Image: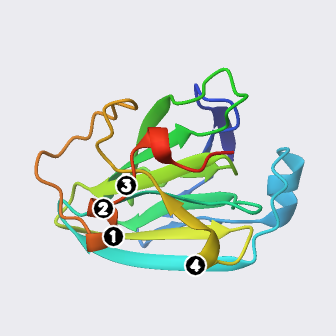
Amino acid sequence: MIVTRGKLDGILIIEPRVFADSRGFFYESYNAKKFREAGIFPDFIQDNHSRSIKNTLRGLHYQVNPGQDKLVRASVGEVWDVVVDIRKKSPTFGQWEGFNLSADNKLMLLVPKGFAHGFCVLSDWAEFQYKCSEYWSPADERAIIWNDPDIGVKWPIAQPILSGKDSKSPPFKEAELF
């Protein structure tokens, strides 16, 4: 596996070793020993799987107390994945970075605690999977509005399909941050 650092401190792009032949392909999407050898130490305790249609936008989500590390990937289709640094003492506080994750490129992204996360679906539909280091806690769930001008994410879709909750998320200035 090849691990590359994103421009925001703590963001890792993980490219698995893929074994392909005339039958298809095989790869390990997670191997705790290999991740530890690469210096990646979260203990994942929950797996989530979503399926969304084209132009669906989910995010920007995060948890507080203590937060969640996430290992994310698109297992079917293609998404534009976004992370926002919400760590007040970070030199990249308030900055964002985007990544194309797809079933074809098989890239995974490690999103550590202290980042808001979201994605939009570029293909007709996508299945998105992520491992989490903490259990989902409704009381600790937070969000930032997807189109906050103070963050300025350049989403590649014009008319996103949003949940009621995501359409009413607070702006960055009012968010509870790390």
Name the mark nearer the viewer: 1 or 3.
1
Q: Quadrant of residue 151?
A: top left
Residue position marked by numbered label 3 in the rendering? 119
Residue behind mark 1? 165
Marker disc for residue 168: 2
Residue name at image x 52 percent, y 48 percent:
175
Label 3 CA crowd tier, 10 Å (few <14, some 14–19, many 20+): many
Q: Identify whether 165 is placed above or below 142.
A: below
The amino acid type found where label 1 is placed reads Lys
Taking the spot 42% from the left edge, 50% from the top edge, the residue there is 105
Q: Which residue is mark 4?
A: 138
Tell me the crowding category of disc 4: few under 14, some 14 to 19, or many 20 or more residues within 10 angstroms, Cα based: few
Report, in whole angstroms, how far the alpha carbon at label 4 lies from the one at label 2. Answer: 16 Å
Instruction: Give the mark nearer the N terminus: 4 vs 2.
Output: 4
- Comparing marks 3 and 4, which lies closer to the viewer? 4
Using the image as rendered, state which of residue 152 and residue 6 is in the foreground: 152
Which is nearer the N-term, disc 1 or disc 3? 3
